[in-house]
């Protein structure tokens, strides 16, 4: 199993304990689909910070209004 997947599972459990269920759901979506589209909301920002921390590949739209994180 990939090391980033394990780190994401620990982050998933941490967000569940903190009560941030939308962020936890987005982490599960990333693990299942291997990519996730993000917007400009606070929940997406939490996922983007995790992606930077785990050095995942991130692409941005042409006007930086959205991002896509790849596992």
Image: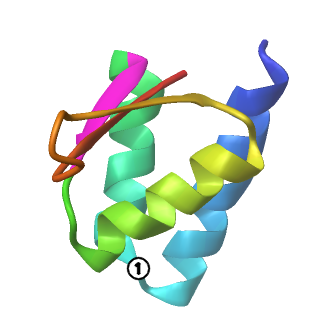
Residue stretch in magenta: 34-38
Q: Quadrant of the C terminus?
A: top right
Nearer to us in this view, 58 or 16: 58
Residue at the extreme bottom: 18
What is the magenta segment's predominant secondary structure? strand
Establish if 33 lies above or below 16. Answer: above
Residue 9 falls within the magenta-colored stretch: no
Question: x%, y% of residue 67?
Answer: 30, 41
Q: Where in the figure is residue 38, as x and y percent of width and height?
A: 25, 48
Give the residue number, with chain letter if any, for mark 1.
20
Whether 47 is drawn above or below 5: the answer is: below
At x 33% / y 54%, what residue is drawn?
25
Numbered-mark total: 1
**For residue 37: magenta?**
yes
User: What residue is rendered at 84% in x and 25% in y?
Assistant: 3
| Residue 52, x across and y down, in percent | 66, 48
- Measuring 21% from the left and 66% from the top, which residue is drawn there? 40
Q: Is 62 positioned to the left or the right of 60 in the image?
A: left
Q: Residues within 10 Å of mark 1 (few under 14, many from 20)?
A: few
Residue 13 placement (x, y as % from top left): 62, 63
Q: Quadrant of residue 37?
A: top left
Q: Residue furthest top?
A: 1
In the displayed structure, 20 sits above or below 12; it is below
Q: Is residue 63 left or right of residue 24?
A: left
Which residue is found at the position 49% from the left and 54% from the top? Answer: 48
Local secondary structure at mark 1? loop
């Amino acid at each position: 199993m990939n090391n980033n997947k394990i780190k994401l599972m620990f982050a998933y459990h941490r967000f569940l304990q903190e009560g941030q269920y939308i962020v936890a759901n987005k982490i599960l979506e990333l693990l299942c689909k291997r990519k996730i589209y993000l917007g400009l909301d606070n929940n997406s920002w939490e996922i983007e910070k995790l992606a930077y921390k785990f050095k995942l590949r991130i692409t941005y739209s042409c006007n930086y209004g959205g991002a896509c994180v790849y596992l």
